[in-house]
Image (spheres, grey):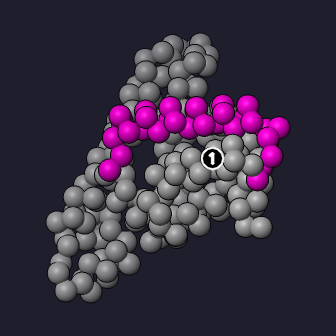
């Protein structure tokens, strides 16, 4: 099991259970390894392209080198955020990924884009008012779609957003459309108004 990439904690959990869930663990690990394989294939192809573009005595094409960096940063974008989550939360996130399809991702992205625009348009509203509270409710539901209501994932997500200044530039660029600090501040005030 260690050879397949399972952590000692994961192995211990599997062995401690009355009903051995090895098929599920193997299926999850296979998916993780398949994703890593796809990443390595993209990285290898980007490097091959760079090798083909290199000509003796000439400088490398900056566009090709940029592509290699982007491919590698995509992998970093998946791994850099792991430090914000406990091992248990990371395992639950991996389990939740099985529920996540490209169609669902597209729908959730659309919902976030619409919600973000509506919050930007409501920045002058009273955070305790009905409109702001309705927006905060939608915000909570979208976050819960990611966390599944799991407290560990929710805490990790909070740590992730607190670490915003340390995010890789590529990730910040990727979410630039969702980066207006006034929106986050407004939603924070709307949540705070609920607690009063």
Figure quadrant of the N terminus: bottom left
Name the residue located 56 percent from the left edge and 25 percent from the top edge. Answer: 65
**Horizontal arrangement in the rendering, residue 74 relative to residue 104 (left or right):** right
Residue drawn at the location 31% of the way across and 82% of the way down: 12
Q: Residue at x 76, y 59 (%)?
A: 193
Q: Is mark 1 on a helix, strand or loop?
A: helix
Residue picked out by circle 1: 134
Task: Measuring from the top left, give residue 183's x and y in whole percent.
Answer: 74, 41
The residue depicted at 19 percent of the width and 86 percent of the height is: 18
Residue 170: x, y in percent? 62, 37
- Quadrant, the C terminus: bottom right
Mark 1: give few (<14), some (14-19) or many (20+) Cα within 10 Å. Answer: few
Q: Where is residue 181 in the image (x, y as percent from the top left)?
A: 77, 42
Q: Give the range drawn in magenta.
A: 99-128
Question: Residue farthest to the front?
Answer: 130
Q: Does the magenta stretch include residue 107?
A: yes
Is 45 placed above or below 16 here? above
Residue 101's x, y, as percent?
A: 33, 41
Magenta segment's dominant SS is: helix
Q: Of residues 90 and 70, which is closer to you in this image?
A: 90
């Amino acid at each position: 099991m260690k050879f397949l990439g399972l952590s000692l904690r994961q192995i211990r959990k599997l062995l401690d259970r009355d009903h051995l869930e090895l098929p599920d663990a193997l299926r999850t690990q296979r998916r993780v390894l398949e994703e890593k394989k796809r990443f390595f294939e993209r990285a290898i192809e980007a490097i091959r392209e760079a090798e083909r573009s290199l000509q003796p005595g000439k400088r490398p094409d900056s566009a090709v080198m940029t592509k290699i960096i982007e491919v590698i940063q995509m992998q970093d974008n998946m791994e850099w955020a792991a430090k914000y989550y406990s091992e248990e939360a990371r395992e639950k996130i991996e389990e939740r990924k099985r529920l996540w399809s490209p169609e669902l991702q597209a729908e959730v992205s659309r919902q976030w884009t619409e919600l973000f625009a509506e919050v930007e348009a409501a920045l002058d509203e009273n955070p305790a008012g009905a409109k702001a509270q309705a927006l905060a409710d939608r915000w909570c539901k979208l976050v819960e779609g990611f966390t599944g209501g799991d407290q560990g994932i929710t805490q990790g997500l909070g740590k992730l957003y607190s670490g915003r200044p340390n995010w890789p530039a590529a990730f910040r660029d990727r979410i630039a459309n969702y980066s207006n600090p006034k929106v986050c501040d407004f939603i924070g005030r709307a949540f705070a108004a609920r607690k009063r």
